[in-house]
Amino acid sequence: MHPPLIVDSKDAKWNILKEVLKIFDSRRARQELAKSGVRVQNGAGVLKIVLTAMFFSVEISYVVSELKHRKELMRFLNLCEVLEARHVYRFLSQFSPDAFIALVLRVLNLQCGKRSKRRAWLIIDSTDLQLDINWFRRRIKKADLEDREFKWGYSPSKGYYIGYKLTMVVDKRKLKPLVFLIHEGSPNDAKLFREVLEEIKRRRIARKGDVILADKGYYSYKNYVLAISRFKTVPLIFPRKNFSLRRLLGMLSYPLEVFCSRSGEKLMFVKLVREFVRLIKDWKRFKAVRSVIDDLFKVAKNSFALDKLHRYTKRSVKKFVALNVLLVGVVVSLGFREKEALQRLAEW
């Protein structure tokens, strides 16, 4: 049984939610909804209801039920009418995952702003997305999942699970989520590194000279070479014990397109290598910087219902994660950027 949703102006959690929902009352947010072909009033109302459900880790139907019985909650969400739960789900289903993600990221940009022109540090990490499946009632084998979108996976902290893996890229300075990818099961992080770099390049997020900060899960000599030679970035991937800088430098040579280009490209390549060598020699100093993304994942799971998903298709999981990323990004933009503040928020 869930506690009643009684609005309390003295409660910090309600005040934070109020600031989050203000976004959808702004003119620019409504313009983004209209560009996506959404009826503005209904669209804003649906998103408010879903985010409220995620904020308090309850079902959408429960929020709808509370809205019908509590006028103060209606006023808090600034709604003219109460939508039925089926209308909320129907609204969400009309979007393709890519279109919905694009809409959410545009709304997030309204609150957090776009990246500055100076060099950025992009932090990459992944976490498990576990589905709420009662496997004590039914034993689930790999053969049972061959035709399903979710797979068996393994998390070092939680063991085996059924679900997906979420990979996210955040801006070090603002802690703003920039990109997220969802994969079935738990593929190796090192094998996903190229896909992540291609995605941030496609979205024009990464620029020449940006630093890519990642833990040892992404360690691979090929990934170092790939980031420098092809994507023109500095890969500060934490090395393992058997790492040999001399061996890696022997693998770093001018790509053919750089060798045949003007001297400016060659100079850029040399600068990237020098910056990489400088940072990788002192990589332990950046452990605390990288760990902040772990705190963001804890906030998403402990505070915003990402711990156990009640969605069983990749399509619905992508949309739910997109709204969760929006919620995390907006809350961080409200001032929760320090490690201690994020840890307190994760304990709510």
Image (spheres, helix red, strand yellow):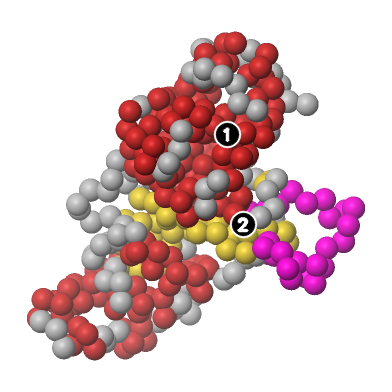
Q: Amino acid at mark 2?
A: Lys
Query: What segment carries the magenta color?
Result: 129-154
Image quarter of residue 149: bottom right
Q: Which residue is mark 2?
A: 314
Image position of 193 (left or right of 29)? right
Image quarter of residue 238: bottom left
Question: Quadrant of the image for the N terminus?
Answer: top right
160 vs 255: above or below: above
Q: Residue at x 21, y 77 (%)?
A: 269
Label 1 environment density (alpha carbons within 10 Å; few <14, some 14–19, many ≥20): many
Q: Which mark is residue 50?
A: 1
Label 2 environment density (alpha carbons within 10 Å; few <14, some 14–19, many ≥20): some
Q: Residue 218 colored magenta?
A: no
- Residue 316 makes an appearance in the image: yes
Image position of 132 (left or right of 342)? right
Q: Amino acid at mark 1?
A: Val
